[in-house]
Image: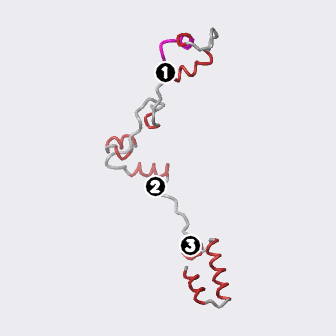
Amino acid sequence: MHFSSLTVHESVHAHGTGRGNRCGAVRTAIPVLRRNRKMPKHRDQATPVDGDAPPVPWHALDARTLSTRLDTPVDGLNEAEVRKRLEQWGPNQLPHARSTPAWRRFARQFNNLLIYVLLISAATTLALQHFIDTSVILAV
């Protein structure tokens, strides 16, 4: 952060408060600090909290740096390390979701208010013996 060399109290008296002799140091302390602080225009330009450089994406790292960060040899893990990590972290796979049967996915396509209106219209035109209209409605 960048602060002026003047204290808040001196800064207020140097710039004046516009209120006569009344001291406004307490009221204007925050605006003075805000005025002297440079804020980044974008979130990605902000300085990280720990002071380190922003993290580099994994795909941009070379193999040696990546193997050092992951504590893995470049040529791969030995069998003992594989068993140890398998016990610690489990297998490297996503959980399998139960698949929905095809007939149920097809039936869900008809669970819509507009479909119900069309089916009622088709039944009505069929009852009135307007077979061409019924077939057109059902074709939609």
Question: 64 or 43, which is in the foreground?
Answer: 43
Magenta stretch holds residue 11: yes
Identified at 49% across, 21% down, the residue is 36
Q: CA distance from mark 2 to mark 1?
A: 51 Å
Dot 1: what SS?
A: helix
Q: CA distance from mark 3 to mark 1?
A: 61 Å
Q: Which residue is mark 2?
A: 92
Position above or below: 79 against 98: above
Q: Residues within 10 Å of mark 1 (few under 14, many from 20)?
A: few
Return the x and y of residue 53 as percentages of the image width and height.
40, 33
Q: Nearer the viewer, mark 2 or mark 3?
A: 3
* Quarter location, residue 27: top right
Badge 2 amino acid: Asn
Dot 2 or dot 1: first in sequence order is: 1
Q: Residues within 10 Å of mark 2 (few under 14, many from 20)?
A: few
- What is the number of the mark on residue 105? 3
Question: 77 or 17, which is in the foreground?
Answer: 17
Badge 1 amino acid: Asn
Position above or below: 50 against 95: above
Q: Which residue is mark 1?
A: 36
Q: In the rendered structure, which segment of residues is drawn in magenta?
A: 2-12
Q: Are marks 2 and 3 in contact (CB under 8 Å)?
A: no
Q: What quarter of the picture does the C terminus occupy?
A: bottom right
Q: CA distance from mark 2 to mark 3?
A: 30 Å
Badge 3 amino acid: Arg
Identified at 65% across, 88% down, the residue is 126
Dot 3 or dot 1: first in sequence order is: 1
Dot 3: what SS?
A: helix
Q: Nearer the viewer, mark 3 or mark 1?
A: 1
Identified at 53% across, 21% down, the residue is 33
Q: Are marks 3 and 1 in contact (CB under 8 Å)?
A: no
